Image (spheres, rainbow, N blue to C red):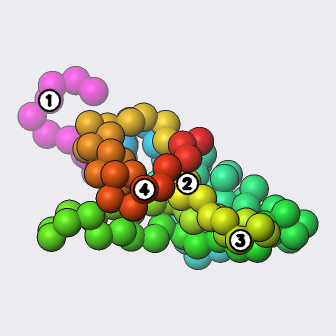
């Protein structure tokens, strides 16, 4: 767009549409009434549904929240409940932020569990 002082309605809408992009290029995706932060996370959800239907896993939970300290929490993308009774904490990552790396370390130290990144 050129540096003009006035925009018509269509130019303004185009500006607003382009302005709403995610910082890392992720596109929010809605499936089964759930809004996922990225297409990659939505695809993983679909894989889990297929695994559940095939009885490869016992179940899964979306976006469980863990309290790390007073005023500090970590929200994983999924918990997977395996048939053998074990469970996995899964985070679907396209980009690891400094905040995520710090919370991951605190989570793993506090709960003595590993976060699986896909």
Q: Earlier in the sequence, mark 3 or mark 4?
A: 3
Q: CA distance from mark 3 to mark 4?
A: 17 Å
> Which of pointers 1 and 3 indicates the residue nearer the eye?
3
Farthest residue, direction top: 2
Q: Secondary structure at mark 4?
A: loop
**Residue at mark 3:** 85
The residues tagged by marks 1 and 4 sit, at their Cα atoms, a distance apart of 57 Å
Q: Residues within 10 Å of mark 2 (few under 14, many from 20)?
A: some
Q: Residue at x 87, y 70 (%)?
A: 55
Is residue 49 among the parts visible in the rendering?
A: no
Mark with earlier residue (1, 4): 1
Mark 1 surroundings: few (<14), some (14-19) or many (≥20) residues within 10 A: few
First to last magenta residue range: 1-16
Number of numbered discs visible in the structure rendering: 4
Q: Quadrant of the C terminus?
A: top right
Q: CA distance from mark 2 to mark 4?
A: 15 Å
User: Is 8 part of what is drawn in magenta?
Assistant: yes
Q: CA distance from mark 1 to mark 3?
A: 63 Å
- Asked if residue 48 is positioned above or below residue 14 in the image, the reply reads below
Q: Quadrant of residue 105?
A: top left
User: Which mark's residue is nearer the viewer, 1 or 2?
Assistant: 2
Q: Is the residue 19 above or below the residue 30 in the image?
A: above
What's the distance in space between the residues labelled 1 and 2, CA to CA? 48 Å
| Residue positioned 27% across, 43% down in the render | 102
- Among the two numbered marks 1 and 3 on one chain, the one whose residue lies closer to the N terminus: 1
Q: Is residue 60 visible?
A: yes
Residue position for label 4: 112
Where in the figure is residue 37, as x and y percent of width and height? 47, 54
Can you identify the residue that label 1 sits on?
4
Q: Compare residues 86 and 117 and report the one nearer the observer.
A: 86
Secondary structure of the residue carrying tag 1 is loop
Residue at (62, 64) in percent of width and height: 87
């Amino acid at each position: 767009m050129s540096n003009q002082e006035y925009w018509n309605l269509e130019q303004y809408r185009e500006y607003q549409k382009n302005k709403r992009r995610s910082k890392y290029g992720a596109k929010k995706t809605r499936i089964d009434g759930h809004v996922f932060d990225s297409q990659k996370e939505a695809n993983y959800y679909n894989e889990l549904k297929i695994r559940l239907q095939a009885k490869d896993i016992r179940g899964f939970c979306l976006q469980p929240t863990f309290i790390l300290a007073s005023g500090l929490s970590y929200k994983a993308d999924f918990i997977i409940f395996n048939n053998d009774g074990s469970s996995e904490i899964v985070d679907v990552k396209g980009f690891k932020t400094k905040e995520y790396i710090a919370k991951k370390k605190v989570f793993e130290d506090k709960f003595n569990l590993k976060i699986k990144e896909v």
